[in-house]
Amino acid sequence: MPVKILMPALSPTMTEGKLAKWLKAEGDDIVSGDVIAEIETDKATMEVEAVDEGVLAKIIVPEGTDNVPVNDLIAVLLEEGEDDSAVEKLLAGGNDNAAAPAKKEEVKAEAPKAAPAPAPTAAPAPIPATSSSRILASPLAKRLAEQAGLNLANIQGSGPNGRIVKADIENAKTGGTPLKSATAPQTTSFAPASSGPDAASLAEMLGIPHHLQENSGMRKTIARRLLESKQTVPHYYLTVDCVLDKLLDLRKQINDGADGLFKLSVNDFIVKATALALKKVPAVNSSWTDNALVVYDRADVSVAVAIPDGLITPIVKDADNKSLKAISAEVKDLAARAKDGKLKPEEYQGGTVSVSNLGMFGIKEFVAIINPPQSCILAVGAGDQRPIVKDGALAIGTVMTATASFDHRAVDGAVGAQFLEAFKNLIENPLTMLA
């Protein structure tokens, strides 16, 4: 019998996805293990492999389709000896997922047609403006109306408080905007609107040149999670300055001795130091729940990586037990695949602490928003030369500012301070990270 190919759940939290691309066409032979499609989630684009063998007889969901629910039918596979009639029979009955689109089409087809537009009537006489009546219109709408020879007094505005906007003028030129009744008195309300206009409406009203850029699924997810974090997690912030001179010297020695086989970055030391600090102060390596504090036994460091659609945090797992060389290679690999949208869900979901480093952009200091359910994120700025006191005398040193954001429900202030103290000691005495 025909084999149903359903929209897969590519992560535990996935409820829908975008069918980005079909890699097989109708009529192609499919072998188990063949990559047949690419599915785009809110975090990455992943390949889908066929489980069964047969012929791809029917593609139900075309490529480029957004918001396809998990477990919806996306294609049908025919086994040996079956023909297209088996597909028709499958789609005709007994398959809820396949029937849903058909039902929508039926409803659409049976929807009553809109009543024909009434014959045009003579426009009402213009209503003269008086000192007690004021026409609300955006500057752009006024200019367009003047160019088109339209009387604003005869146009019903669709903006806040009846304000006339560009769309009303465009509709009026084609006869689509309702005209004001000549017998109805024109009044102006000064009561505030229940909610202000959004940015697009405001730009339209004020005649500010702009364009709209559709939000990606990733951008919507980032916005939702960050808003939730700031609204529900009680943040507090602690900052330390770390002198980098010893770390930079050690890094140079290691890189010079590697003969080009690998090259450590300052960020590799930061990831290692963060993981070791978690092991020294395990209370920070935790997540808050109402019933119990979840304390993790492994230090998994999420490293923030900027990608075209936003931000993703691939994870260096068990980072405290990995060498600097291993961390460096892993971070480079994860970052490259993150930018290509090729990370697996388990490579970016989870993590017990996050590191966000903007030092490469010259940012001196910043604070970051916690990535729930984690209890800490470390924001790292650039190392630059600053005056320091060394052995009781003024000197010049390379200093990096690091600010940690903590969830106060799980991490008390003194515990957060102990974590940053441990991190600072590791950074300023980097040989301890090699032990």
Image: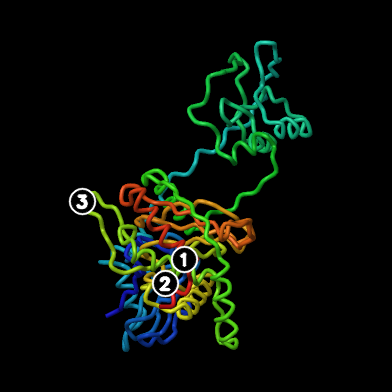
**Left or right: residue 200 compared with residue 429:** right
Mark-to-mark CA distance, 3 and 1: 29 Å
Percent across and percent down for residue 176 are 62, 36
Q: Earlier in the sequence, mark 2 or mark 3?
A: 3
Percent across and percent down for residue 154 are 67, 24
- Are the residues at dot 2 and dot 1 in contact (C-beta closer than 8 Å)? yes
- Determine the residue located farthest toward the top in the rendered image: 131
Q: Amino acid at mark 3?
A: Asn
**Label 3 secondary element:** loop
Q: Earlier in the sequence, mark 3 or mark 1?
A: 3
- Above or below 322: residue 362: above
- Are the residues at dot 2 and dot 3 in contact (C-beta closer than 8 Å)? no
Q: Amino acid at mark 2?
A: Val
- Above or below 147: residue 319: below
**Label 1 secondary element:** strand
Instruction: Name the mark on residue 291.
Output: 3
**The C terminus is located in which quarter?**
bottom left
- Are the residues at dot 3 and dot 1 in contact (C-beta closer than 8 Å)? no
Is residue 164 shown to the viewer in this render?
A: yes
